[in-house]
Image: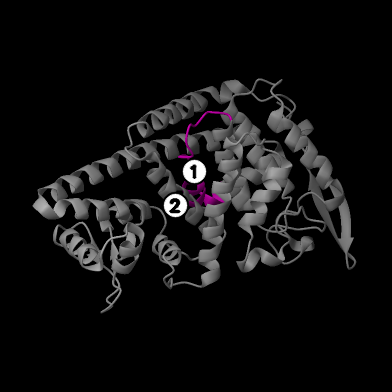
Amino acid sequence: MNNKARLGTYISNNIGGEKYQSFVPQKLPPEPSLNLEKLYSNLDKATKALGRLDNVTEFVPNIELFIYMYIRKEALLSSQIEGTQSSFSDLLLYENKEQPGVPIDDVEEVSNYVAAINYGLKKLKSGFPLSLRLIKEIHAILLKGGRGSNKEPGNFRRSQNWIGGTRPGNARFVPTPPEKLMECLGEFEKFIHDDKYKLPLLIKTGLLHVQFETIHPFLDGNGRLGRLLITLLLCDNGTLKDPVLYLSLYFKKHREVYYDHLQSVRTKGAWEEWLNFFLEGVTETAEQATKTTSRMVTLFNKDEEKIKKLGRAKESALKVFEHFKSRPLNSVPSITKRLKMTAPTARASVNHLVKLGILKEISGKQRDKMFSYKAYMDILNEGTN
């Protein structure tokens, strides 16, 4: 197949006398049309893996709790790809108004990502279309405060950006120039809602992700927002009932391959190769999430059975245990306040859970000690180190 027709065009520019070329992609879908026969095997595997994940989440006693934690894991991983040093513990300490062990800007970035995902999902559920307007609103939340606050949050860029290197002239890639930006974004938005091509949603999502990263419409946050859009697209179209699929762990694990595929689409029109990589990622990630869900449910049930043998103390201990499921790092004062429980009862319940091996004291403080639901944290931390 001759892929030359799929290649975008380069526009020559110069800054301070130094020449560079910025890239304008062809509109979607690719022409010549995708060779779907090359994709059917991986598409079938990915679709079945998503179906199994959707089914297993129906048996989770509290899906909101699972989503709450999974969104935080995605936020952490996606931000780590961009170079932040925050850990899961740092994020939870920050949310508990405790001092994290890394620069506060790192943790704020992750916390903003959580807020941005939640905002996008809430707007979609209310019937708001996935549009350029919503993308800008999500971006404003993503870059609120911290390092990104001076990069025009919520506004498409009006100047040239670049990827790699110190300036456009020595960059690895120079995205769409500002004068062509709205034209490309208009076509991008049109393709989101255009179903005349009858493409499977996973294929369409893979195409849109590359197109967004290639246009790179913001001064900062494009990588995080592009990964976030994958989940929004799958939830918006009903492929997933709940936001339980996140590809950042897969992209982090195969970071250089991921970047190489994005570049190969731009330089060679290699859409099929990218899409097979993307679909393999969906399959691997969905299967991983299915296993993680089952392990979490098994852990919760096992620990609950231990607590039920406590006799009279079990009622309060179960309440505290439920609280640790949603906030696996916690202190007695925080538990007392949130559960409207007396300090002696909260302390006694925590001590019971420590003796049962469910909680572990991690702060080493004499007062306001921090306790961790360690086995749960170990599951959540997988892939984030």
Which amino acid does the dot numbered 1 rest on? Tyr
Q: What residue sits right under mark 2 in the picture?
A: 73
Query: Percent position (x, y) of residue 278?
Result: 54, 37
Residues under labels 2 and 1: Cα distance? 9 Å
Q: What residue sits right under mark 1 in the picture?
A: 246
Query: Percent position (x, y) of residue 143?
Result: 64, 60
Q: How busy is the neighbourhood of tag 1: few (under 14 within 10 Å), some, or many (20 plus)?
A: many
User: On the picture, is 14 further left or further right than 381?
Assistant: right
Asked if marks 2 and 1 touch (Cβ < 8 Å), the reply is yes
Residue 290 or residue 162, whichever sits in front? 290
Residue appearing at x 63%, y 67% in the figure: 147
Is residue 69 one of those drawn in magenta?
A: no
Residue appearing at x 25%, y 64% in the figure: 342
- Say what secondary structure mark 1 lies in: loop
Residue appearing at x 43%, y 44% in the figure: 67
- Figure quadrant of residue 202: top right
User: Start and end of the magenta stretch?
Assistant: 237-257
Which amino acid does the dot numbered 2 rest on? Lys
